Amino acid sequence: MKTKTILASLVVFLAGFAVCVAADLNMGTWKLNEAKSKLSSGATRNNTVVYEAAGDSVKITVDGIDSNGKPAHNVWTGKFDGKDYPVTGDPTSDARSYQSVDAHTLALSVKNAGTETVTGRIVVAANGKSRTVTTTGTDSKGNKISNTAAYDKQ
């Protein structure tokens, strides 16, 4: 009985630890490395992405250039639990969800008016110094898009 309790406690601890590690690896400031990125023509360029703690949630602040060449800024605050949380400042979406897949990977979903428009994965390198964001979906004109953005940790 004691062994089962210890084993169960260890499994719960490790599962919780994996979620925390995924969040911790993403925390900080990330700068777009355009030379290593493959972005669709006219795609929004998220030049700087900042992950920071906000109580028991994570706040993600994105600054970049939109498809028209104008400054873009949006903010998302939520948890990496796969549930939708509102986005402010993004005219192309009103909700996002992030889900921890493993210690280095997050799955993401972008929605507008309840319709999923973009899905993707964020993978942090083993050394924690870079990450790759791969997304697919449709733009505001209904065109298929596919982007791979490389970021360096600052």
Image (tube, rainbow, N blue to C red):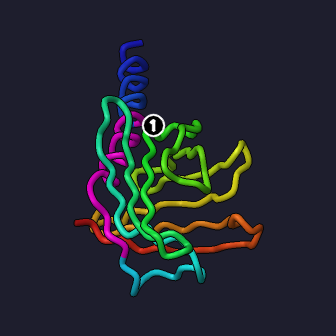
Which of the image's four quarters has the C terminus? bottom left
Figure label count: 1
Q: Position of residue 114 (x, y in %)?
A: 72, 42
Q: Position of residue 98 (x, y in %)?
A: 52, 46
Instruction: Relative to 79, say whether 138 is above or below.
Output: below
Instruction: Relative to 95, say whether 121 is above or below.
Output: below
The answer to whether residue 28 is left or right of residue 106 is left
Report the residue marked by disc 1.
79
Q: Residue at x 64, y 59 (%)?
A: 118
Residue that sits furthest to the left in the current view: 154
Q: Residue at x 38, y 42 (%)?
A: 18
Residue 43: which quarter of the image?
bottom right
Residue that sits furthest to the top in the current view: 1
Q: Position of residue 148 (x, y in %)?
A: 52, 75
Q: Magenta: predominant secondary structure element? A: helix
Q: Residue at x 40, y 17 (%)?
A: 5
Q: Please, what secondary structure does the residue beneath circle 1 have?
A: loop
Q: Dot 1 surroundings within 10 Å: few (below 14), some, or many (20 or more)?
A: some
Which of these two is toward me, 28 or 125? 28
Which amino acid is tagged 1?
Lys
The answer to whether residue 82 is left or right of residue 35 is right
Instruction: Relative to 117, say whether 4 is above or below.
Output: above
Q: Residue at x 52, y 82 (%)?
A: 38
Which of the image's four quarters has the N terminus? top left
Which of these two is toward me, 40 or 67? 67
Q: Position of residue 152 (x, y in %)?
A: 30, 71
The answer to if 22 sits in the magenta stretch is: yes
Residue that sits furthest to the bottom in the current view: 35
The answer to if 101 sits in the magenta stretch is: no
Q: Which residues are magenta?
A: 15-32
